[in-house]
Structures are given as structure tokens and as C-alpha cells.
Amino acid sequence: MDLMIQRDVDLADLSTFRVPARAQRLVRIEHARQIRAVVDHPELGVLPKLVLGGGSNVLLTRDPSGVVLKIEIGGMHVVQDDADSTLIEAGAGVAWHDLVCWTLRQGFGGLENLALIPGTVGAAPVQNIGAYGMELSERFDSVELVDLTTGRSATLDRAACRFGYRDSLFKGPLAGKSVITRVRLRLPKPWRAQLGYAELQRHLERAGRRDPSPQDVFDAVCAIRRAKLPDPARLGNAGSFFKNPVVNRTIRNEILDEFPEIVSYPLEDGSYKLAAAWMIEACGCKGRSVGAAAVDTRHALVLVNRGGASGADVLRLAESVRAAVRERFGIELEYEPVLV
Ligand code: EPU
């Protein structure tokens, strides 16, 4: 199979941070079998490989060596539709938000809480995308992937993917070792609005939607996101740069004694998620900048490229925010995007 190898490619527009970087080689992947061809290729086979989807959860701090695989596998279809659920499948290169819109147009609710999340379908399981009271893992059925060493395909079910909060097998043991080519999602019937996220419920009540439809929930999520989060098409960013730290009850109570206003959420296992955005803001970091990289003035979890920032600027800024939170709260923040 022929492969088109592009050389010395500008990557600035291939990641939503829009920081400068160049790829020595880049191959656009439109079919899963092209990955096998890359693995078997005399020049490319032995090189390190970086997989890029929508580039919305990656920070390029250097020029990646080897070959960049830009995943552009398309297609969305209904696999099975029965009384209990609808099983849908999409190619890894489909934009996640386009899939959400497509399911709603087909009359299938179930993904509306995850509207407007930037990035591709193939990237969604990697960090187990989540927002407004829902995580991908709740709708996930299986993935097809191709092993980057052997070129073989495999299917993994939900249990095998070991999903956690913004975490999965693909960020851990499988990181850099495989490419997700297709994703299957199961949308349960009957549809029920998932309104556990207080702000979403308040928004719908204010709009007079006491018995909301999937479209109402979609509209509300889009409105909240547009009001709170910068649009990567206008201002370079990768969504939340930091994860919300999870701590045990003792640590949470110690912090609460000293900072009674801190925002935290109890989790099912008895631990607590602390709002990192609250802590960053409490440290006075909102608006802090290094070069043209800045902590967003609307949402403190988001680092933005005001124009002309390098990946190194963003990383230095992230480190200074992390140091401030460590000093004040004794908590080590973790980065959410993948650093290259
Ligand atoms: N807050 C502040 N300052 C800010 C922003 C928020 O004090 O600048 C406080 C808010 O008052 C609120 C709390 O922090 O009480 C939580 O804020 P928010 O509801 O915006 O949620 P989050 O925990 O900061 C998470 C996800 C987002 C997701 C939202 C909504 C993570 C790392 N981030 O943010 O995901 O959209 O919940 O569900 O879990 C992403 O991952 O890229 C992302 C945007």
C-alpha cells in the first residue's frame, strides 16, 4: 500500500495550543490498513511514532522525532438498534462534537452532556473525556486499535480499557504503543437526562426546561461551555491543563480547616475531588503569564496561548502554577494534556 510521506511539516495548526513545532515526517492515516503499512515500511517502521488526533490534548514542547501519524479515519454509523440501547460506531478521525450532533440528528440522546469537547473520537477514550456530570466510559462499548510494533488489530472492551478520571490504559501501559482506529458507543434506552451537575440543572431550570429533551441538555451544555471556556479556534488552549486532585478525607479536612471556602466534591469511594481552579485562583495565579502563555482570566484551569507562545513558555507557566499550589496547599497538581 502506498503511503504519502510529507516532510518538514509545520505542526502549529495541528494542535489546538498552536505552539510552533515541525515534524520531520508526517503521514495522514485515512484507513486502518495504512497503519500496518507504516509498521512494515522500510524507512518508517523503525522510527518513533507520535499519534495526533485533533491535537486538543497535547502540548508540543519540541519537534517530535520520527514520524507523526495524523489520524483522519472517518465514518459514523448505527451498528445495532434494539429495545435497550443503540450501538454506534465512528472512525477515530471524526470530530467528537460532530459525532454528538450526528447522534442527536438521528434521534439518539446519550452524548449531549459531552457536547463541544474539542478533539477527535479516537482521542476521547485516551483521557476518558468528561464534562457536566458524564464521562465517556459510561457510554463506551469498545475500541478497535492497531499495535504499532506488530501492525496487528485488536478489539478492547470497556473493562480492558481501565478507565479512570481523565485516565485509561492508553495513557498508561499502552501509551505510544497503539493507534485507536474506531470507537463503539452504547446509548442506553430509554433516554434519561443526566443532570447531576448542579450548574447544568440550574441553567435548565432558569430556561424553564423542567422536563428537558436531549436537545435542551445539549443547548444548555453548549451555552455554559461558551460562557466559561475559551474557544480553541479563537485562543490557543487544550482545555483544562490540570486535573482536579483526588485526596482522602483526612487531607481534605485538614485543608478545609485552613481554607473553609475551598470547593470539593465527595466521590463514591469516600475520597474527595478538590477544585484545582479554585486553588489556582486562590493563589492569585489567574491571568499570570510567561511570555504569551497565560492562565485564562475566565477559567483558571485553562492555560492559553495569547499569540506567539512556545510550548516551553506554556510548560514554564504550568510549573509556576504548580509550585504556587504546592506551596499554599501542599497539593501536587497533575497535568492533563500529553506532553511531547
Ligand atoms: N472555579 C474557580 N475559578 C475558576 C474556575 C472555576 O474558583 O477560574 C471554581 C468554580 O467556582 C467551581 C469549581 O471551581 O466551583 C469547579 O469549576 P467547573 O465547574 O468549571 O469545573 P472544573 O472542575 O474546573 C471540570 C473539567 C472540565 C469540565 C468541567 C465541567 C477537569 C480537569 N476539568 O472542570 O473539563 O468541562 O469540569 O464538567 O476535570 C477539560 O478536561 O478540558 C475540561 C474543560
Image (spheres, rainbow, N blue to C red):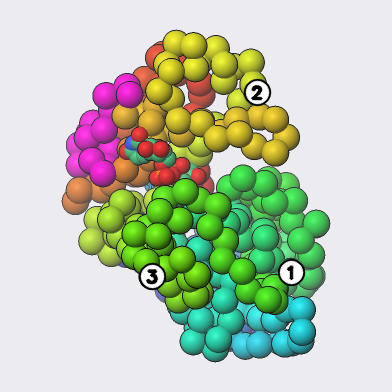
What amino acid is found at the position of numbered circle 2 in the picture?
Answer: Asn
Asked if the residue under mark 3 is in contact with the one under mark 1, i.e. CB atoms within 8 Å, the reply is no
If you read the primary sequence from the N terminus, does the residue marked by circle 2 or circle 1 appear first?
A: 1
Q: CA distance from mark 2 to mark 1?
A: 32 Å
Q: Which mark is residue 248?
A: 2
Q: Which mark is residue 142?
A: 1
Q: Position of residue 104 (x, y in %)?
A: 51, 81
Magenta residues, start to end: 282-298
Asked if the residue under mark 1 is in contact with the one under mark 2, i.e. CB atoms within 8 Å, the reply is no
Q: CA distance from mark 2 to mark 3?
A: 36 Å
What amino acid is found at the position of numbered circle 1 in the picture?
Answer: Ser
Q: Position of residue 259 (x, y in %)?
A: 42, 16
Q: Main secondary structure of the magenta part?
A: loop
- Helix, strand or loop under label 3: helix
Query: Is 284 in the magenta?
Result: yes
What amino acid is found at the position of numbered circle 3 in the picture?
Answer: Asp
Does label 1 point to a residue whose CB lies under 8 Å from ligand 1?
Answer: no
Q: Residue at x 77, y 84 (%)?
A: 83
Q: Residue at x 60, y 56 (%)?
A: 135
Q: Residue at x 27, y 24 (%)?
A: 284
Left/right placement of residue 338 relative to residue 174 reads left
On screen, 29 above or below 262? below
- Which residue occupies the foreground of this view, 284 or 15? 284
If you read the primary sequence from the N terminus, does the residue marked by circle 2 or circle 3 appear first?
A: 3
Mark nearest the camera among 2 and 1 is 2
Left/right placement of residue 57 relative to residue 142 reads left
